[in-house]
């Protein structure tokens, strides 16, 4: 972007100069967002610079945008005094030292609302996959489908329905609320918990016509959800201590299912494996892991786990909304 900058030298002389603003979209950016930025005059570079090369190469850019892969930590910020803006295309900012960046005068933006629906829909992809054993049949049918068809038919004969069952939502922010809306539409009972006070009313827009219905979900404590829910889904930001560990798995309803499309670390993975092995937990749907991008093999190969590689926000629609929102934030930042 060409912007008039006031350059002041030590002798208080002032001049204006046109500078070209450069953006490194290190984890990519949706083409619509990229076009918006380019139309506004920015140069957008979408090459993916490896993490260990960033300290030497990022300083030529004014802005870096990232998703969750690239880490923007203190050392990188210190190495790049020319950097002015960090943009997170997505919600979680646990890969960015946000406070430190702001102390150093950088602006940090994220796009908290753009991917909520996509993440919520992935929760139900895992739930539907779980209640009808698709996670297992998709692995076994290609191998045993012709020789053991009837055995497999028997193995997957005890499916259940979602309607009338209770889903416990841990974390009732934007994504938790979208999960509640879908659950209500499916005829499920919703128990919602959050650390902070929240409005239990959700607005559901009925397909096509735009008719709106307001529904109150039932608020619950963490303990109540653990004791009563048939399905538990996590929607809190990353925190150091797991919300679900061995103690909690002791107290869940036998046969509960757990879905985590939020952050690895919210579940004690070994405790989850034990609970799956003992049958206390019927199945888990996991999009996120403790140790990304190299999750525990015991989870990846577990026959009762439905797996996705952190793709909650990875839909065309969400990425377009994210790219557009982020581009808008960057453009208005430099217009200020
Ligand atoms: O925090 C988020 O927005 C999600 O975890 C998505 O992460 P991603 O941008 O790496 O897909």
Image: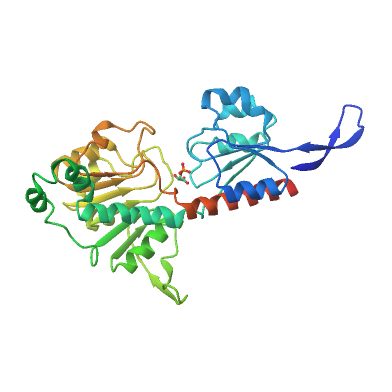
Q: In this view, does 279 lie above or below 125?
A: above
In the rendered image, the residue lying farthest to the front is 146
The image quadrant that residue 139 belongs to is top left
Give how far across and how far down residue 156 sits, in percent: 13, 52
In this rendering, would 30 be left or right of 159? right
The image quadrant that residue 148 belongs to is top left
Q: Viewer-proximal residue, 59 or 103? A: 59
The image quadrant that residue 203 belongs to is bottom left
Q: Name the residue at 39% across, 42% down.
A: 310
Name the quarter where the N terminus is drawn: top right
Q: Is residue 178 above or below residue 79?
A: below
Residue 248 shows in the view:
yes
Give how far across and how far down residue 11 sits, in percent: 92, 27
Q: Is residue 288 above or below residue 47?
A: below
Q: In this view, does 114 lie above or below 301?
A: below
Q: Viewer-proximal residue, 87 or 19? A: 19
Give how far across and how far down residue 157 sits, in percent: 11, 56
In this rendering, would 146 be left or right of 69? left
Q: Name the residue at 13% across, 42% down.
A: 144
Residue 194 shows in the view:
no
Q: Name the residue at 43% across, 46% down.
A: 237
């Amino acid at each position: 972007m060409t912007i008039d900058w006031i350059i002041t030298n030590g002798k208080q002389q002032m001049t204006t100069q046109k500078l070209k603003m450069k953006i490194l979209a290190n984890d990519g950016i949706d083409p619509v967002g990229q076009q918006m930025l380019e139309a506004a005059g920015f140069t957008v570079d979408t090459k993916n610079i490896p993490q260990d090369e960033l300290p030497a190469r990022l300083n030529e850019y004014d802005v870096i945008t990232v998703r969750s892969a690239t880490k923007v930590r203190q050392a990188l910020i210190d190495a790049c005094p020319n950097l002015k803006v960090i943009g997170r295309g997505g919600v979680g900012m646990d890969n960015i030292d946000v406070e430190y960046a702001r102390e150093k005068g950088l602006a940090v933006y994220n796009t908290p609302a753009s991917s909520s629906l996509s993440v919520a829909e992935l929760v139900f992809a895992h739930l539907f996959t779980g209640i009808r054993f698709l996670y297992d049949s998709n692995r076994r049918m290609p191998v045993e489908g012709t020789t053991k068809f009837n055995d497999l038919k028997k193995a997957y004969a005890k499916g259940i329905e979602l309607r009338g069952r209770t889903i416990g939502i841990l974390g009732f922010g934007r994504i938790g609320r979208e999960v509640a809306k879908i659950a209500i539409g499916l005829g499920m009972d919703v128990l919602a918990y959050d650390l902070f006070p929240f409005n239990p009313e959700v607005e559901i827009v009925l397909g096509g016509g735009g008719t709106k219905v307001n529904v109150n979900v039932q608020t619950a404590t963490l303990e109540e959800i653990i004791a009563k829910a048939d399905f538990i889904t996590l929607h809190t930001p990353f925190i150091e201590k797991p919300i679900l560990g061995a103690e909690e798995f002791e107290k869940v309803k036998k046969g509960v299912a757990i879905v985590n499309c939020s952050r690895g670390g919210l579940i004690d993975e070994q405790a989850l494996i034990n609970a799956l092995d003992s049958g206390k937990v019927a199945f888990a749907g996991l999009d996120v892991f403790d140790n990304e991008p190299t999750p525990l093999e015991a989870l990846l190969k577990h026959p009762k786990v439905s797996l996705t590689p952190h793709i909650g926000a990875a839909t065309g629609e969400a990425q377009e909304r994210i790219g557009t929102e982020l581009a808008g934030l960057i453009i208005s930042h430099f217009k200020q």
